[in-house]
Amino acid sequence: MTTDFFKRMGLFVLFCLVQALVLNHIHLLGYATPLLYVDFVLSFKRTYPKWAILVWCFALGISIDTFSNTPGVAAGAMTLVGALQPYILEPFVPRDSAEDLTPSFHTLGITKYMTYAFVLVFIYTLAFFALEAFSFFNWQQWLFTTGGSILLTYVLILVIENLRRK
């Protein structure tokens, strides 16, 4: 067992607890709910095995589903983002970077990291709320909920990343 595994496990437990106990009860303006656990996917190293990313993402998603009473929604969306993460990260990585690069403001640069984070948050939130609604009958509410959650989650991730730098 490596220290990376224990760090991941600590992050896993922390994100589950924070989401279940605090963030699930926040509905800004009745629409936006922060889905901060997406930050877990953003921090995988460049050379992290793809199968391991999928396992971690599915496990986190199913744990969030258990605590949030959203059967399979977070697991499906997290697995999708986990499958796409290595391919979305690759265009943002500098050519001369180390193989074990961990995405952050420092390693990718602020603009590239912000774009990378936005793309993953956008895909995750879109998939999450599309699976949750499972229809577009009330598409305006779905749009407000998705847009507000994307914005709120993205801002929280940038704040955490900024705090991580210091």
Image: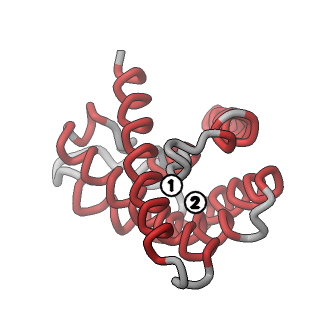
**1 and 2 marks in contact (CB < 8 Å):** yes
Q: Is residue 149 left or right of residue 15?
A: left
Few, some or many C-alpha atoms within 10 Å of disc 1 (few <14, some 14-19, many ≥20)? some
**Label 2 amino acid?**
Ile
Few, some or many C-alpha atoms within 10 Å of disc 2 (few <14, some 14-19, many ≥20)? many
- Mark 1: which secondary structure? loop
**Please, which residue is most extreme toward the top here?**
166
N-terminal label among 1 and 2: 1
**What residue is rendered at 53% in x and 64% in y?**
82
Q: CA distance from mark 1 to mark 2?
A: 7 Å
Q: Position of residue 9 (x, y in %)?
A: 71, 39
In this rendering, the count of numbered labels is 2
Q: Nearer the viewer, mark 1 or mark 2?
A: 2
Q: Which residue is mark 2?
A: 53
Q: Is residue 1 visible?
A: no
**What residue is rendered at 29% in x and 61% in y?**
90
Q: Position of residue 148 (x, y in %)?
A: 42, 52
Q: Position of residue 155 (x, y in %)?
A: 37, 38
Q: Position of residue 154 (x, y in %)?
A: 39, 45
In the rendered image, the vertical position of residue 141 relative to residue 67, given as above or below = below
**Label 1 amino acid?**
Tyr
Q: Is residue 31 visible?
A: yes
Residue 22, picture quadrant: top right
In the rendered image, the vertical position of residue 127 relative to residue 124, given as above or below = below
- Mark 2: which secondary structure? helix
**What residue is rendered at 34% in x and 65% in y?**
88
Q: Which residue is mark 1?
A: 48
The quarter of the picture where the C terminus appears is: top left
